Image (cartoon, coloured by chain):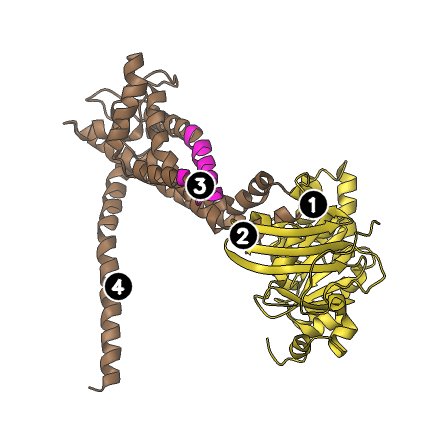
């Protein structure tokens, strides 16, 4: 074999090995999706979205309270985390070299790595114990704390990608620094920031641990923020560890709804990015 | 217009007249005396003194890294945003020291517009790009005035006919030359006295470049224009005065025709004849 042929063969072998590795990585994902869809689809019906759970022994029923609960909890988390996260991100990108920024960045990265159960314990300590009451607010707080570092870091990274020429262009027209940031720099990075926010939402919507002892669970429908509230994840957990066949089916359906929610979020994020990119003529 | 007093700076080695443009009897728009500029420890400009005349085009030429862009950016204090930047000496526009404590750089930049080397339209519509400066400075009382000034600026930049039917489309969908003229329109909209142009045509094809040059020629009726260029033919074509910078120093400054035919300095001659740089 010539030297050249050997090189080509080696190159093909490596490309093949890489493809194989990708395939191996995708297999678990494919299995998870396959089982969630095939099992979940059986119990999924319109009733699942419009009806309350039924007692053990009866078939049917839905997760209306849990679906609404998850929407309320993620809504609370977003209301808290989006302003704080985005503004922290702006600060870090505007004052990149300072010691305070390094500290904030380090804190955000650390917070991002804290196990979610620990964040749940924290929310339990500050928002449940003092009031002797599980509540949607406590659950929203826990999820919000998890979202802040994700949003802050994404915002920072994306703002740093905006070309300096944009800032100079605005300043040269007589804009103040704050004006340039809010009218030119942030809008330039907005599609990316929106994507980051949506992905953060999808991430916390799938959390169970921080909700176990903050929002707890609720057999009944509620929209009171000071009451315990159900969520899809906790409900799936409750059903899955129960000994009843009916509940297992409901758990699969709940899991399917969650996976779909995450998928829709990702698609929305992509759609928003593509749409804004088109508006910008790219 | 107030004419500032003659500079009290030492101009060793080189001929004072050829260095500062004092030989010109005309009016002075920008008077720079003994200006030095530092990036931290590094000295980028050495003791520059120059007189720039109103309603004329002044070109800054010189090899890369000679400080011509840095000098341009001291004239509207764009260098203020560079960390560790420090300016010594005086820059006066219409007799007012622009580095005085009372001067707000934001207000200064409204009077001294700037166009950059790489066109930098905002990711907004064509209309909103031109309207941006008017909006942030509160320069239009109502929608009609805003629309009027946007049209006027686009006409001045010779862009109106090309974009009047798609004002609300994205500016980033325009060609490179159109984007650069949009940036000129955007700068003109806030009605500056002075327009600083930092190699405005260096990224454009010859036809787009020609349009920019024609535009510069038209605009000098209403504005004082300072243009940095790498291209010596361009300096010869568009400018009335030319300043040659080398290693952070102003080597020679004179009427463009004289600079290109009978420069006083050997260095200038070598540069304009293409012997180096």
Please report, as a chain letter, where disc 1 is located: B
| Residue A228 shown left or right of residue B65 in the figure | left
Q: Chain of mark 4?
A: A
Answer whether labels 1 and 2 touch (C-beta < 8 Å). Answer: no
Q: Quadrant of residue A107?
A: top left
**In the image, residue B121 lies in the stretch drawn in magenta:** no
Cβ atoms under marks 3 and 2 closer than 8 Å: no
Most foreground residue, A214 or A251 = A214
Residue beneath disc 2: A164
Chain shaded brown:
A
Mark 2 / mark 4, whichever is N-terminal:
4
- Where is residue B190? Give x, y as percent: 73, 46
The reply to whether discs 2 and 4 touch (Cβ–Cβ < 8 Å) is no
Q: Is residue A195 in sight in this rendering?
A: no
Q: Residues within 10 Å of mark 3 (few under 14, many from 20)?
A: many
Label 3 and label 2 in one chain: yes
Range drawn in magenta:
A80-100
Q: Disc 3 or 2, which lies upstream in sequence?
A: 3
Q: Nearer the viewer, residue A216 or B1?
A: B1
Residue B15 got which mark?
A: none
Looking at the image, residue B168 lies above or below residue A118: below
Q: Nearer the viewer, residue A37 or A22?
A: A22
| A100 relative position to B110: left or right | left
Labels 1 and 2 share a subunit: no
Color of chain B here? yellow
User: Who's the residue at 16% across and 27% down the image?
Assistant: A242
Q: CA distance from mark 4 to mark 3?
A: 39 Å
- The residue where tag 1 is placed is B108
Chain letter of disc 3 in the image: A
Of mark 4 and mark 3, the one earlier in the sequence is: 4
């Amino acid at each position: 074999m010539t030297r050249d042929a050997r090189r080509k063969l080696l190159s093909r072998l490596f490309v093949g090995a890489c493809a194989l590795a990708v395939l191996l990585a995708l297999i678990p994902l494919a299995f998870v999706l396959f089982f969630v869809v095939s099992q979940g689809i059986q119990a999924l019906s319109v009733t699942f979205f419009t009806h309350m759970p039924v007692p053990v022994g009866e078939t049917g029923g839905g997760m209306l309270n849990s679906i609404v609960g998850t929407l309320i909890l993620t809504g609370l988390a977003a209301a808290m985390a989006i302003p704080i996260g985005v503004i922290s991100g702006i600060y870090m990108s505007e004052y990149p070299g300072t010691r305070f920024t390094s500290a904030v960045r380090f804190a955000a990265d650390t917070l991002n790595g804290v196990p979610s159960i620990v964040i749940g314990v924290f929310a339990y300590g500050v928002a449940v114990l003092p009031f002797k009451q599980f509540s949607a607010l406590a659950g929203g707080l826990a999820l919000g704390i998890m979202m802040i570092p994700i949003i802050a870091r994404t915002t920072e990274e994306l703002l740093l990608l905006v070309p300096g020429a944009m800032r100079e262009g605005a300043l040269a027209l007589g804009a103040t620094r704050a004006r340039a940031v809010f009218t030119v720099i942030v809008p330039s990075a907005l599609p990316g920031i929106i994507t980051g926010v949506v992905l953060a939402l999808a991430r916390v919507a799938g959390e169970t641990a921080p909700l176990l002892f903050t929002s707890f669970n609720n057999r009944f429908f509620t929209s009171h923020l000071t009451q315990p509230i159900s969520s899809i994840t906790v409900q799936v957990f409750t059903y899955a560890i129960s000994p009843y066949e009916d509940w297992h089916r409901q758990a699969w359906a709940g899991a399917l709804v969650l996976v779909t929610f995450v998928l829709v979020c990702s698609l929305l994020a992509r759609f928003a990015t593509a749409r804004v990119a088109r508006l910008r003529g790219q | 217009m107030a004419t500032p007093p003659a500079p009290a700076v030492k101009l060793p080695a080189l001929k004072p007249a050829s260095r500062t443009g004092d030989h010109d009897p005309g009016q002075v728009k920008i008077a720079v005396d003994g200006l030095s500029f530092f990036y931290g420890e590094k000295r980028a400009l050495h003791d520059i003194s120059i007189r720039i005349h109103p309603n004329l085009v002044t070109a800054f030429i010189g090899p890369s890294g000679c400080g011509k862009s840095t000098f341009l950016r001291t004239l509207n204090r764009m260098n203020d945003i560079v960390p560790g930047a420090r300016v010594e000496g005086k820059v006066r526009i219409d007799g007012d020291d622009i580095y005085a404590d009372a001067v707000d750089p934001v207000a200064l930049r409204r009077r001294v517009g700037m166009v950059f080397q790489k066109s930098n339209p905002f990711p907004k519509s064509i209309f909103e790009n031109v309207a941006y400066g008017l909006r942030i400075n509160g320069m239009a009382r109502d929608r009609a005035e805003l629309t009027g000034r946007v049209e006027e600026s686009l006409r001045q930049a010779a862009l109106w006919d090309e974009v009047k039917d798609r004002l609300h489309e994205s500016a980033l969908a325009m060609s490179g030359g159109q984007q650069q003229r949009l940036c000129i329109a955007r700068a003109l909209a806030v009605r500056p006295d002075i327009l600083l142009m930092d190699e405005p045509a260096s990224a454009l094809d010859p036809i787009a470049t020609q349009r920019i040059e024609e535009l510069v020629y038209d605009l000098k009726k209403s504005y004082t224009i300072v243009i940095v260029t790498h291209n010596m033919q361009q300096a010869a074509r568009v400018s009335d005065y030319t300043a040659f910078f080398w290693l952070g120093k102003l080597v020679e400054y004179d009427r463009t025709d004289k600079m290109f035919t009978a420069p006083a300095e050997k260095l200038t001659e070598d540069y304009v004849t293409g012997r180096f740089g």
